[in-house]
C-alpha cells in the first residue's frame, strides 16, 4: 500500500524539521569551538570574568554576524523574485 499524499507531506515536513535541528546543533558546536579556541588559554577550575566576557562577546558577534548574513540572503532572494 502506497503512502497517501498527506503521509508523504508529513514525512517531508518531519525530515525538514530534523534537518533544521541538525543544522542548528552543528552551528552551536561550531560556535563553541570558535569561542573556546579564542577565549580559553588554559584550563581552570572556575571561569574568570575576562574569560566570561570573552565568551559573551564571541557569542554575540557570532549571532550578529549570522543574522546579518541571513538578512542579506533574504534581501537578495527578494530582489531576485521581484526582477
Image (cartoon, grey):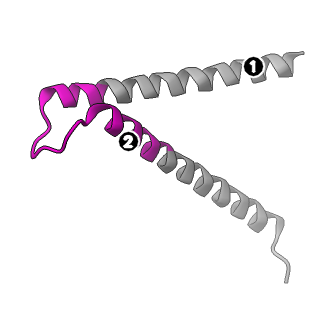
Camera-near label (2 vs 1) is 2
- In the foreground, 49 or 63: 49
Q: Which residues are magenta?
A: 27-56
Image quarter hosting the C terminus = top right
The outermost residue toward the bottom is: 1
For residue 76, the mark is: 1
Please tell me which residue is depicted at 80% across the width and 16% down the height of the picture.
79
* Residue lying at 64% horizontally and 60% vertically, measured from the top left: 14
The quadrant of the rendering that contains the N terminus is bottom right
Task: Provide the residue designation for mark 2.
Answer: 32
Residue 46 magenta = yes
Q: Tag 1's secondary structure?
A: helix
Foreground residue, 64 or 51? 51
> Against 9, is 79 above or below?
above
Would you identify the image quadrant in which residue 69 lies?
A: top right
Principal secondary structure, stretch drawn in magenta: helix
Q: CA distance from mark 2 to mark 1?
A: 29 Å
Q: Position of residue 32 (x, y in %)?
A: 37, 41
Image location of residue 9, percent across then percent down: 76, 60
Residue extending farthest to the left is 45
Tell me which corner region of the image, top left, top right, bottom left or bottom right, holds residue 59: top left
Seen from the viewer's position, the closer of residues 53 and 7 is 53
Element under disc 2? helix
- Asked if residue 34 is positioned above or below residue 17 in the image, the reply reads above
On screen, residue 66 versus residue 5, left or right, reads: left
Label disc, if present, on residue 7 of the rendered structure: none
Q: Earlier in the sequence, mark 2 or mark 1?
A: 2
Q: Position of residue 64 (x, y in %)?
A: 46, 22
Q: Which residue is the extreme one toward the right?
A: 83
Q: Is residue 5 left or right of residue 19?
A: right
Task: Name which residue lies at 75% across and 19% down.
Answer: 76
Amino acid at each position: 500500500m502506497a503512502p497517501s499524499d498527506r503521509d508523504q507531506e508529513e514525512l517531508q515536513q518531519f525530515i525538514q524539521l530534523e534537518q533544521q535541528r541538525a543544522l542548528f546543533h552543528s552551528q552551536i558546536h561550531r560556535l563553541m569551538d570558535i569561542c573556546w579556541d579564542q577565549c580559553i588559554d588554559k584550563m581552570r577550575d572556575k571561569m574568570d570574568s575576562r574569560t566570561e566576557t570573552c565568551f559573551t562577546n564571541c557569542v554575540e558577534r557570532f549571532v550578529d554576524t549570522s543574522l546579518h548574513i541571513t538578512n542579506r540572503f533574504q534581501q537578495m532572494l527578494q530582489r531576485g523574485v521581484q526582477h
